[in-house]
Image: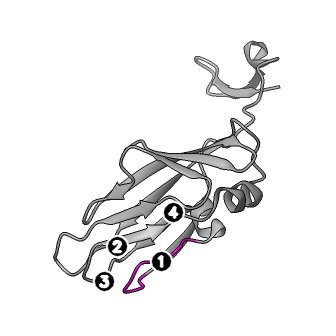
Amino acid sequence: MARQMNQSAGTGSNQILTSPTLAGVPKATAPLCEQFTTATIGTAGDVTYTAAQFCGGVIRRDPNGADRVDASPTAAAVIAERGMAVGDAFYFTLINENDAGGEEEIEIDPGTGVTALGSATSTAKGAARFRVECTGAAAIEIARVI
């Protein structure tokens, strides 16, 4: 049962009161803060993200002087990594850490079983947030949401 502190008027004493108004309120089933594993990639060339990098939540990518077209892992690999069922979804962020002063962009090329809805690009010195949803036994969709 929830407790709150109450200072009694005029006495200066503290009392612990129980709060019956919170009894029976369901606890949150999901964490209030997401936990991420950050992958840092600085390869001077296009790369294929591993399922662990893709599912970790944050990819920090330095394109090293040129635009990059990085490939996503296969849908089957992502589904297996996350233990996903149809309708399950998660988010990840691609951070473009371009430090060469240019306008290098990073585009995600969908792997086997992956469908990109709209733009899958992170602009220079920016970040893009993506939603990944399982749409079939070996199919996912990625959509840029920010």
Q: Tell me which residue sits at (34%, 73%) in the image.
A: 68
Going from N to C along the chain, the mark reached first, 4 or 1, is: 1
Q: Which residue is mark 1?
A: 47
Asked if the residue under mark 2 is in contact with the one under mark 1, i.e. CB atoms within 8 Å, the reply is: yes
Label drawn at residue 6: none
Q: Could you classify mark 2 by the number of other residues whose Cα lies within 10 Å: few (under 14), some (14-19), or many (20 or more)? A: many
| Distance between the alpha carbons at the discs numbered 4 and 2 | 17 Å
> Which mark is nearer the camera, 2 or 3?
2
- Taking the view exactly as shown, the residue that stands out farthest to the bottom is 44
Locate residue 16, reporting x and y percent.
Answer: 75, 27
Asked if the residue under mark 1 is in contact with the one under mark 3, i.e. CB atoms within 8 Å, the reply is: no
Q: Quadrant of residue 102?
A: bottom left
Q: Tell me which residue sits at (72%, 54%) in the image.
A: 79
Tell me which amino acid carries mark 1.
Val
Task: Note whether 78 is above or below 31 in the view shown.
Answer: below
Q: Which residue is mark 2?
A: 68
Q: Nearer the viewer, residue 92 or 73?
A: 73
Q: Magenta segment range?
A: 42-49
| Distance between the alpha carbons at the discs numbered 1 and 2 | 8 Å
